[in-house]
Image (cartoon, rainbow, N blue to C red):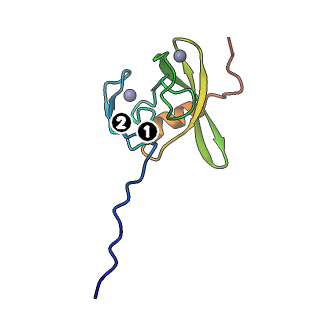
């Protein structure tokens, strides 16, 4: 009697697990495939055009400039210090809540786009 063996299919994951050292605070950040910013200081780097694609050549530091609450979730607003590119990412559960609270005191609607 034969038991059906599950075939060992290889799935292609497009998400990348990348560990990186935060250029702002020096913390070693363990990537889980979605991590694109430092969970300690929330700074990020301008490496993506679309989330995860690593297609941007800028490489500048992305400063967290504010928090927006959307459907009960914290969205971090970023601005690249080098080129001024702005984008938003969802905060992760591991993110430093104190910094999120500090940032949420800043109204993202009042910031100046220069
Ligand atoms: Zn950091
Ligand atoms: Zn940039």
Position in image of residue 44 (x %, y %) = 46, 27
Task: Give the labeled residue for mark 1.
Answer: 35
User: If the image is split into quadrants, where does the N terminus sit?
Assistant: bottom left
Residue 68's quadrant in the figure?
A: top right
Categorize mark 1 by other alpha carbons within 10 Å: few (<14), some (14-19), many (20+): many
Residue 33's quadrant in the figure?
A: top left
Q: Earlier in the sequence, mark 2 or mark 1?
A: 2
Where 70 falls versus 10 (above or below)? Answer: above
Gap in angstroms between the C-alphas marked 2 and 1: 8 Å
Q: Residue at x 31, y 30 (%)?
A: 27
Position in image of residue 15 (x %, y %) = 45, 42
Q: Residue at x 51, y 27 (%)?
A: 48
Which residue, as the protein is rendered here, is positioned at the far right?
109
Where 45 falls versus 34 (above or below)? Answer: above
Q: Who is closer to the viewer here, 15 or 70?
A: 15
Pointer 2 with pointer 1, Cβ within 8 A: yes
Mark toward the viewer: 2 or 1: 2
Query: Mark 2: which secondary structure?
Result: loop
Position in image of residue 109 (x %, y %) = 71, 27
Position in image of residue 80 (x %, y %) = 54, 18
Q: Who is closer to the viewer here, 1 or 47?
A: 1
Task: Give the labeled residue for mark 2.
Answer: 18
């Amino acid at each position: 009697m034969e038991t059906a063996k599950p075939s060992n299919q290889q799935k292609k994951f497009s998400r990348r697990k990348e560990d990186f050292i935060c250029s702002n605070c020096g913390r070693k950040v363990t990537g889980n495939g979605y991590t694109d910013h430092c969970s300690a200081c929330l700074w990020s780097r301008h490496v993506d055009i679309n989330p995860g694609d690593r297609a941007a050549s800028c490489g500048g530091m992305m400063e967290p400039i504010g928090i927006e609450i959307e459907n009960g979730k914290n969205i971090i607003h970023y601005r690249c210090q080098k080129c001024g590119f702005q984008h938003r990412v969802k905060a992760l559960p591991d993110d430093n809540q104190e910094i999120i609270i500090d940032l949420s005191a800043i109204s993202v609607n009042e910031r100046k786009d220069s």
